[in-house]
Image (cartoon, helix red, strand yellow):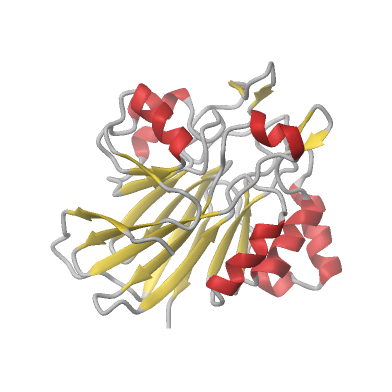
Amino acid sequence: MEESKRIILPADSTPANFDNGSIFFIGTATVLLRYAGFTILTDPNFLHRGDHVHLGYGINSTRLTEPALTIEQLPPLDLVVLSHMHEDHFDHIAAEKVDKNLPIITTHHAATKLKQKGFNSPQPLKTWETLTVTKGDANLCITAMPGIHGPGILKALLPPVMGSMLEFQTPNAETKFRLYITGDTLIHQQLYEIPRRYPNIDLALLHLGGTMAFGILLTMDAKQGVQAIQIIAPRTAIPIHFNDYTVFKSALEDFKKAIVQAGLENKIKYLNHGDTYTFTVA
């Protein structure tokens, strides 16, 4: 693993709470994570039902759902984790209204695009590279995980994508909670390296949906979502990035059926838009 980059955030007046945390599901791949004194937003997408996104090469898609809250309703944020630069992950509302000085941890491609949009603090990571964020007596190590958004030649045509491993640590470097976010990836060989490097993953957020373009799969469908759980072996997994856009062709109901067939029901928590998953860390 490469030497870690580091940024330091202003400390809160109260000590970090390592005992409890929460995931609030806003919609698509957008969640609000609160843990150890950090407030983190992922893949900000606040478009409304009927709005359109442009995904390149003439591919457009219409949003079918409403976000659970508006961008104006967000609490103060410490940082954003962005898997890649597509409009269903960073839309024009985010481009206009996210604080231009907020750290955004993402790919080098997306960091370049963000700078062009006026953002001052994108933090680009290569695969397996780590950024350490310190806030008071808590450290957060964010490491870019391997991701492939499309097979073959489509991989070169689509924006690079990364997954993320978030490790929340005490001042003595004890990891209290480990969260893996898949990003918009398909199953591929490098994913098998993740559990070898990170054998104890507490929670995984799975980008599903079975996105299709030109008849080709671009994000995990129900079958691949089950494979991801079997490969990564998290204690708990939450599916996100489903049923929100017309290019999503694998419904959440398909994933639920595949989970039952695989006997993995005890590992899954399902969230509707606006639901909160709370967790306790031993």
Q: Name the outermost residue toward the top.
A: 58
Name the outermost residue toward the front: 2
**Is 277 or 101 nearer to us in this picture?**
101
Q: Which residue is drawn at 58% across and 48% down?
A: 183
Q: Where is residue 53 in the image (x, y as percent from the top left)?
A: 59, 23
Image location of residue 189, percent across then percent down: 71, 58
Can residue 268 be seen in this snapshot? no
In this rendering, the answer to whether 117 lies above or below 173 is: above
Residue 3: quadrant of the picture: bottom left
Judge from the rendering whether residue 76 lies leftward or rightward of residue 246; answer left or right. left
Residue 226: quadrant of the picture: bottom right
Query: For the point 44% across and 64% down, which residue is it?
Result: 1
Q: Is residue 75 above or below residue 265?
A: above
Q: In this view, does 274 lie above or below 168?
A: above
Would residue 240 be found to the left or right of residue 225 on screen? Answer: left
Picture coordinates of residue 100, whole percent (x, y): 28, 31
Q: How many marks?
A: 0
- Locate the C terminus by quadrant: bottom left
Residue at position x 56%, y 38% in the image: 160
Q: Which residue is more in the foreground, 41 or 165? A: 165
Outermost residue to the bottom: 282
**Relative to 57, 251 lies left or right:** right
When asked about the image quadrant of residue 70, the answer is: top left
Instruction: Name which residue lies at 43% across and 78% down.
Output: 281
Q: Is residue 148 visible?
A: yes
Q: Where is residue 47 in the image (x, y as percent from the top left)?
A: 52, 28
